[in-house]
Amino acid sequence: MVECAMDTDALIKDINSTLKSRFRDYTGVYFFGSRARGDYGKYSDYDMVFVFGTEPDWRKKDQVREFVYWKEMEYDLVIDGKYYSQEDVEHYKTPFLESVFKKGKFYAV
């Protein structure tokens, strides 16, 4: 894997724009982990939580995974994506989500 020439903000803007055009209920993405903190290594992945207005079913998740896969191939990087509804984000305070909210950044569409 080579270092990606695309900066993170541009990558997330590209992802947000495309997902919003495909899914009307897509609200944005939380970017977290080592890349968000700035303490990443050359081969670190991009940790993201994709948020939708409604609970994403398996079809939607598959469509997002396929899109993300092509972004990974296009930019030679790895994205570790999770999928949540807005309700999950607002009401289910798991240790994982609490960490994402505390240490990550939300990019709304």
Image: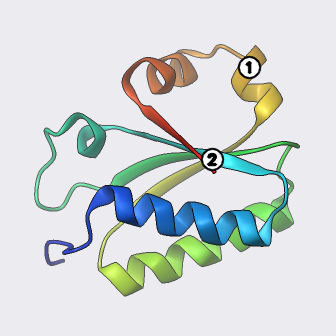
Q: Position of residue 104 (x, y in %)?
A: 41, 30
Foreground label between 1 and 2? 2
Q: Is residue 50 visible?
A: no
Q: Is residue 53 left or right of residue 17?
A: right
Position of residue 92 measured from the top left corner of the image (x, y, whole percent)? 73, 17
| SS class, disc 2 | strand
The kind of residue on which mark 2 rests is: Gly
Q: Residue at x 36, y 54 (%)?
A: 46
Disc 1 marks a residue whose amino acid type is Glu
Identify the image quadrant of residue 108.
top right
Residue 107 visible? The answer is yes
**Helix, strand or loop status at disc 1:** helix
Quarter assignment of residue 15: bottom right
**Which residue corresponds to the image point at 50% horizontal and 22% vertical from the top-left?**
101
How far apart marks 1 and 2 lie (CA) works out to: 14 Å
Quick check: 93 above or below 103?
Answer: above
For the point 26% across and 63% down, which residue is it?
7
In the foreground, 54 or 66: 54
The residue identified by callout 2 is 28
List the residue tagged with mark 1.
90
